[in-house]
Image (tube, helix red, strand yellow):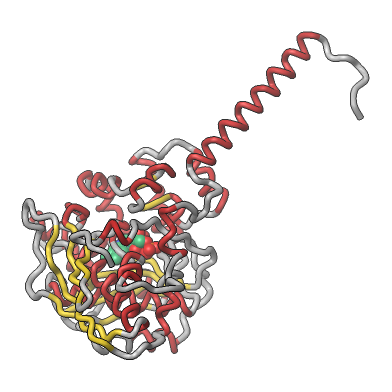
């Protein structure tokens, strides 16, 4: 019931002040929410590529590059460039987008290119072409100084029959899921078997670790490597260069890791977007905590993509193709995946600094791979939260040299 007592002039002023304060606070919050894209979801041009694939009216080779742009890749650096002709597409590594000390031999960069190549092969098949991938052989190495783009592979595009590859439908639905998975729901045996057969034409393989004891052992290695990562200022610095905490930056750069992509609940995501960007220490702490309490604690399975030589170019491309293939298959089955590749990144770090092979041995102690080596470690499970898409640059941004499609 409204009070019949008239407000005193002072009270009136206070109420008015409080009201104005609330309006200002509300407006400021609304402004920050708008600026930081709290309610924008996956809106804006940075996310258009996901909405536009597969195109209703495919034009020339464009859909093939559209598929490439949506591939998984390290830190969402999108380290690719494409030279497109009517007979082939040349795939280039963009050294300007390499992760520096995190990826000193471009191993992860090449895995990302393998993911893009797999998406292109699937799309090309769907659009009536018979793609053939030829990878430039040789060992992986640090990028040559001053050379922005390096040729990695050619995809020959002969004429084929219009196919309907089942994985096409998953290309725009696949996202890395960093949220909690259902810890009580195991992967079906049929899925594990099906994934292990996806490597038949590739020089890479997948290993899955499903028992609680094995998961705990490999999980321990992942956690120790995460601790080593956050204790290494050069790695932390290189990683933070790709964090996009402001909506304006997400839409301007259209790459990197976003708050949206961390797999947090909606209230926590909203709070994280509204609050000032976390300090490096806060971000490291949050990552360590999430690795232990969410990523490892809720995984139904851990796994590894393995190769005979993790520093061979062609095998690394094959590893990327296999990872993308598994991730697309998992997407169709409602299974979530997330790489947890800190152990292999620490192997590279030790190799680059000539600091021995402690990291190699830590993995070998818990994973019996019969002489093969892991190049991508990941977790799998049924998600409790949908993953959000990550930003992408346009097709036009990745065509080299600029030509019409
Ligand atoms: C070689 C490679 C390593 C990756 N390592 C990690 C990782 O350690 N942790 C993680 O959360 N995501 C990792 N990712 C996932 C990428 O961050 C992700 O693919 C990228 O941000 C694009 O997002 P999307 O997969 O949702 O399209 C990795 C991806 C690749 C290809």
Task: Please identify the quarter of the rendering in which residue 225 is found.
Answer: bottom left
**x then y, percent, for residue 142:** 10, 59
Examine the rendering and report whether any part of residue 348 can be seen: yes
Vertical position of residue 19 compared to residue 172: above or below: above
In depth, the one of 171 and 76 nearer the eye is 171
In depth, the one of 304 and 30 nearer the eye is 30
In depth, the one of 121 and 228 nearer the eye is 121
Quadrant containing ligand 1 reads: bottom left
188 sits to left or right of 96: right
Q: In percent of the image, x 30 and y 75: which residue is there?
A: 120
Q: Quadrant of the C terminus?
A: bottom left
Q: In percent of the image, x 60 and y 31: which residue is there?
A: 27
In depth, the one of 404 and 263 nearer the eye is 404
Task: Please identify the quarter of the rendering in which residue 305 is found.
Answer: bottom left
72 sits to left or right of 180: left
Vertical position of residue 405 compared to residue 233: above or below: below
Examine the rendering and report whether any part of residue 221 can be seen: no
Most extreme residue toward the top, as rendered?
Answer: 9
Q: Quadrant of the N terminus?
A: top right
281 sits to left or right of 202: right
Q: In percent of the image, x 53 and y 73: which residue is there?
A: 184
**x then y, percent, for residue 55:** 43, 71
Task: Please identify the quarter of the rendering in which residue 306 is found.
Answer: bottom left
**x then y, percent, for residue 209:** 35, 77
| Image label count | 0
**x then y, percent, for residue 103:** 19, 58
Q: In percent of the image, x 30 and y 46: which residue is there?
A: 240
Vertical position of residue 329 compared to residue 84: above or below: below
């Amino acid at each position: 019931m409204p009070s019949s007592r008239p407000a005193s002039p002072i009270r009136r002023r206070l109420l008015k002040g409080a009201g104005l304060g609330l309006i200002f606070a509300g407006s400021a919050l609304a402004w920050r929410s708008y600026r930081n894209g709290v309610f924008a979801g996956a809106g804006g041009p940075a996310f258009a590529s996901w909405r536009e694939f597969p195109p209703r009216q495919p034009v020339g080779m464009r859909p093939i590059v559209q598929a490439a742009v949506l591939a998984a890749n390290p830190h969402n650096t999108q380290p690719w460039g494409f030279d497109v002709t009517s007979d082939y597409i040349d795939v280039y590594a963009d050294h300007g987008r390499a992760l520096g000390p995190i990826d000193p031999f471009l191993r992860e960069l090449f895995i990302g290119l393998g993911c893009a190549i797999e998406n292109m092969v699937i799309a090309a098949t769907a659009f009536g072409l018979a793609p053939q991938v030829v990878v430039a052989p040789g060992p992986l190495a640090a990028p040559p100084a001053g050379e922005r783009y390096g040729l990695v592979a050619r995809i020959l595009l002969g004429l084929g029959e219009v196919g309907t590859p089942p994985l096409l439908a998953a290309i725009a639905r696949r996202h890395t899921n960093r949220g909690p998975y259902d810890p009580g729901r195991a992967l079906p045996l049929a899925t594990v078997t099906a994934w292990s057969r996806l490597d038949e034409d590739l020089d890479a393989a997948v290993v899955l670790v499903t028992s609680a004891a094995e998961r705990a052992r490999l999980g321990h290695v992942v956690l120790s490597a995460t601790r080593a990562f956050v204790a290494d200022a050069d790695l932390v610095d290189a990683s933070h260069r790709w964090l996009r905490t402001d909506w304006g930056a997400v839409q301007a750069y259209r790459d990197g890791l976003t708050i949206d992509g961390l797999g947090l609940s909606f209230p926590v995501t909203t709070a994280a977007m509204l609050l000032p960007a976390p300090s490096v220490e806060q971000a490291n702490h949050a990552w360590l905590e999430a690795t232990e309490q969410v990523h490892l604690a809720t995984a139904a399975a851990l796994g590894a993509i393995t190769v005979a030589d993790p520093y061979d170019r062609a095998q690394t491309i094959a590893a990327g193709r296999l990872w993308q293939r598994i991730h697309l298959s998992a997407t169709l089955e409602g299974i979530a995946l997330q790489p947890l590749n800190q152990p292999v990144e620490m192997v590279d770090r030790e190799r680059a600094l000539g600091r021995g092979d402690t990291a190699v041995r830590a993995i070998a102690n818990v994973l019996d791979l019969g002489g093969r080596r892991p190049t991508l470690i990941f977790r799998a499970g049924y998600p409790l939260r949908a993953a959000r898409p990550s930003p992408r640059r346009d097709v036009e941004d990745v065509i080299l040299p600029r030509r019409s499609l």
